Image (cartoon, rainbow, N blue to C red):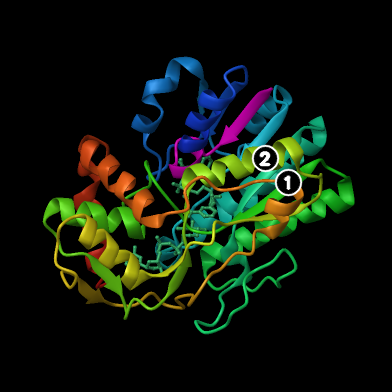
Amino acid sequence: MRVLITGGAGFIGANFVHHTLEHRPDDEVTVLDALTYAANEASLAPVMDRIRFVRGDIADAAAVDALVKQSDVVVHFAAESHNDNSLRDPSPFVHTNLVGTFTILEAVRRHSVRLHHISTDEVYGDLELDDPAKFTPDSQYNPSSPYSSTKAGSDMLVRAWVRSFGIHATLSNCSNNYGPYQHIEKFIPRQITNVLSGIRPKLYGAGANVRDWIHVDDHNSAVWTIIDRGRSGEIYLIGADGERNNRDVLELILELMGKPADWYDHVTDRAGHDLRYAIDASKLRDDLGWTPAFTDLRAGLAQTISWYTDHREWWTGHKDLVEARYAEVGQ
Ligand code: NAD
Ligand code: TDX
């Protein structure tokens, strides 16, 4: 299969490239990525001779058209992905997540190419901390931030293109990912690299907010399951029953890194901070037979801590800037 991967130099996309080369060595991989601040070319350096890499914007219709025409499937990861950044400046989120996805949709429509659109559980808004409910494919869209609202809008575009134009597309909404190659602005790698840099970790508010953690490799195995066996037009929720509050995750990181359980600071909370996300992935498990490989968060975090410890050159050059930007807003 000729696979076009947008956003392949970012966190999940780069892991998806590695996963694809390892498990599907006969597939031809092309990556389209604008190399924004969130990308890291080093993530793909070891496999550059096995892929075609194109630097470009997913909102560039001519560039997208030429690449889509030569593909059998487009796996669309490219996005502006960080909630905190979307609160400072929403404009790149509108450009990439909405205009970029529209541009991809028009190209797959023109050339009748299969699309898999990657999205997030944040499109459903949040759940109460004490609510036993989880998100299902029938949950109502109710996004809170500029990031999640532009992702919700991109999902709506995909759904409309399926219904109105009959494009061959599937959509997945996944919970919070962790693992190697994640940008150090995000919660888990920020705290791991803080400890490795001698900086006290930073917890927003009281740390009671709950996220449903999944290892990035499980997200990617689920995406390939959906591409191989999912039904066109269907929506699948991806999650691995990994609900934990932020304080517990941080204390686990501190324990695994040999620091006292209270070696962190409470900092300014995020505006509009979603309380809890939780995924019911039974459709993916029951209909398509997918199961996650990483079911133990402690083991997955230990592997992730080792990765950041062994790959300091991948992140140290970015650390000062990331922390300076957080310090400006008291985080
Ligand atoms: P990321 O920020 O690490 O990577 C995004 C990549 O997209 C970067 O390489 C960047 O250069 C590229 N990109 C941004 N704008 C572009 C543009 N206009 N044209 C081309 N490339 C562009 O993001 P991530 O965490 O890997 O997330 C990937 C996808 O998965 C996103 O669609 C995100 O919404 C979704 N998702 C993420 C998570 C998570 O926990 N990280 C969970 C669920 C869904
Ligand atoms: O320093 C921090 N301290 C802290 O307490 C940071 C960076 C975050 N947090 C909290 C905020 C959240 O409750 O940790 C939680 C996780 O934060 P993020 O890593 O920013 O993730 P989140 O906002 O939950 O969104 C992530 O999961 C869904 C991804 O960034 C999105 O792209 C994805 O759609």
> Is 259 situated left or right of 62 in this image?
left
**Vertical placement of residue 35 versus 174, above or below:** above
Q: Residues within 10 Å of mark 1 (few under 14, many from 20)?
A: some
Q: Amino acid at mark 1?
A: Leu
Task: Give the structural element (helix, strand or loop) at label 2.
Answer: helix
**Vertical placement of residue 127 versus 55, above or below:** below
Instruction: Quadrant for the C terminus, please.
Output: bottom left
The numbered dot on residue 288 is 1
Front residue of 293/237: it is 293
Residue 139 drawn in magenta: no
Residue position for label 2: 225
What span is colored magenta in the figure? 1-13
x, y (%) of residue 155? 69, 56
x, y (%) of residue 105? 73, 43
Front residue of 101/132: it is 132
Q: Amino acid at mark 2?
A: Thr
Q: Residue furthest left?
A: 198
Residue sitting at 38 percent across and 78 percent down? 208
Q: Are marks 2 and 1 in contact (CB under 8 Å)?
A: yes
